Amino acid sequence: MTLAAPPATRAKFTDPDWTAKGERRASVPLSGLETLWFNTGSLCNITCGHCYIESSPRNDRLAYLEPADVLPFLDEIAADGLPVREIGFTGGEPFLNRSMAELAGLCLDRGFRVLVLTNAMRPMQRPAVRAALSALRERHGGRLQLRVSLDHHSAALHDQERGAGSFAKAMAGLGWLVREGFSVTVAGRTRWGEDQAAMRAGYARLFAEHGLALDAADPHALVLFPEMDETAEVPEITTACWGILNLRPDAMMCASSRMVVRRKGAERAVVLPCTLLPYDPRFEMGNSLAEAARADGGQFDHGAVKLNHRHCAKFCVLGGGSCSA
């Protein structure tokens, strides 16, 4: 592919092929689709201080997904023999969607691992939801995993982010999941400047105090996510960065995952590169996985994702973050 000469002037993260300094922008080819994410809807039962998709009780920009939205993608995976092993569900708060347990069941019945991201608060703790989750666990065991958002090991800092009393409610939900034998992990955030060792020690004390059999030293059991501050100065990622940072494109999240959303008022769902870009129309890849693999022009080069967003740099390349299990 021959690129036109870089524009004389541009702002950062605007040109899909060139950075503001006139350097060739890095891109990530799809090495193999291993994880397919579904955003079940942008509504949430709480409003966090720093939510990357601005979920809240009022944000309905992403519609609730229904089985009719999900099944065509599961059928496409089967028909085309795609190497998908894991289906992830995120939100908003997924358990506000009344179809959440049914959606998870459809994927589990087809043999996928299923990961659900939840704040473990009241929507998940409704008796009907608990009963449905217990039934799924009995049928499918550890192939159903829930990742509970617990931003910090102290109630004060967690509540600072998620609202007064949210820590106690999340801990109640986390405790129920662990006691009932679910496969559970915890997601924390690094926004308070503590180093990883201190944070993991704090979570270890918390888990021990509550009798929770979770290993805070295990990076898979306790995931500490980098922050995505929209106001922070973030460098653009160039093709030279792979060698400078000693990183490989196929280690990035968008090398092995895609996300499906349905926007409010839209007739069909659309495929996006990842969980971090739910609203930006520049990153829409089509209405099917096949269309996404062929997406060309703009932010894409025959399915390869051009890293033309600050989240690509801050969360994935520099932060080493990945939403998959």
Image (tube, rainbow, N blue to C red):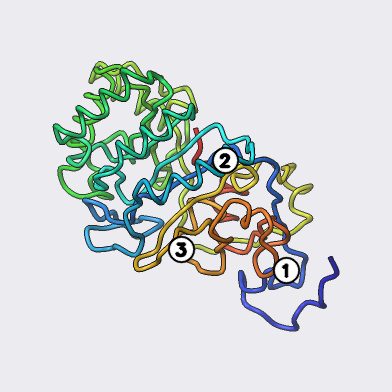
Task: Using a 10 Å C-alpha cutoff, classify the residue at mark 3 as few (fewer than 14 neighbours), some (14 to 19) or many (20 or more).
Answer: few
Mark 3 element type: loop
Q: Earlier in the sequence, mark 2 or mark 1?
A: 1
| Residue 220 in the image, given as x and y percentages of width and height | 48, 27
Residue 138: x and y in percent read 31, 17
Q: Residue at x 31, y 33 (%)?
A: 153
Q: Nearer the viewer, residue 219 or 114?
A: 114
- Image-quadrant location for residue 7: bottom right
Residue 230: mark? 3
* Image vertical order of residue 45 relative to residue 168, above or below: below
* Distance in Å between CA atoms under marks 2 and 1: 31 Å
Q: Nearer the viewer, residue 310 or 203?
A: 310
Q: Which mark is residue 77?
A: 2
Ranked by sequence position, the earlier of labels 3 and 1 is 1
The residue tagged 1 is 17
Q: What whole-number distance in Å separates the C-alpha atoms at marks 3 and 2?
A: 35 Å
- Graded by Cα atoms within 10 Å as few (under 14), some (14 to 19) or many (20 or more), the crowding at tag 1 reads many
On the rendered structure, is 189 left or right of 93?
right
**Secondary structure of residue under mark 1:** loop
Q: Is residue 68 above or below residue 201?
A: below
Whether residue 103 sits left or right of residue 129 in the image: it is right
> Residue flagged by tag 2: what amino acid is it?
Ile
Q: Where in the figure is residue 227, as x and y percent of width and height?
A: 46, 50
Judged from the image, the secondary structure of the residue bearing numbered disc 2 is helix
Task: Identify which residue is drawn at 25% across, 56% down.
Answer: 47
Observer-side mark, 3 or 2, equals 2
* Tag 3–tag 2 contact (CB < 8 Å): no
Quadrant hosting residue 56: bottom left
Residue depicted at 45% across the width and 37% down the height:
224
